[in-house]
Amino acid sequence: RDVITTVLQLITIPKGSHTHRGSYGHLGRELGIILKGKGCLKYENKEYILNEGDSASFSAAVPHVLENVGDVDLQAIWVVTPAQRFVK
């Protein structure tokens, strides 16, 4: 029997940085809620600005990257299933 794991973590992306793998796709889904700062979710050919309190949920199969485009470290709660390590 296969076991599908889900990871929920508090992530911090320093000012001017992004999720560590850059833009890529993988199996599963992601859900994030921005707690502090301002991010830009690049998803396929589109960009979405996410401010404090905003959230996003999407298929992880499409190439994507979350960049910190704000003036402070970005903090977010991020859920990925199945589990992936995506922030250094």
Image (cartoon, grey):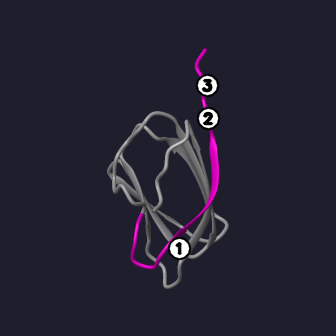
Question: Are dots 2 and 3 in contact, CB under 8 Å?
Answer: yes
Q: Where is mark 2, residue-wise?
A: 5
> Which residue is nearer to you in this view: 9 or 34?
9
Front position among marks 3 and 1: 3
Q: In terms of secondary structure, what is the magenta stretch mainly? A: loop
Residue placed under numbered mark 1 in the picture: 38
Q: Position of residue 12 (x, y in %)?
A: 55, 69
Mark 3 or mark 1: whose residue is earlier in sequence:
3
**Residue 80 in magenta stretch:** no
In the rendered structure, which segment of residues is drawn in magenta?
A: 1-18
Residue 2: % across, % down: 58, 19
Amino acid type indicated by mark 3: Val
Q: Secondary structure at mark 1?
A: loop
Quadrant of res 61: top left
| Residue 3 badge | 3
Tags 1 and 2 in contact by the CB under 8 Å rule?
Answer: no
Name the mark nearer the viewer: 1 or 2: 2
The residue shown at (41%, 38%) is: 26
Judged left or right of residue 20, residue 54 is right
* Residue 9 colored in magenta in the image: yes
What amino acid is labelled 1 in the image? Lys
In the image, 54 versus 79, the foreground residue is 79
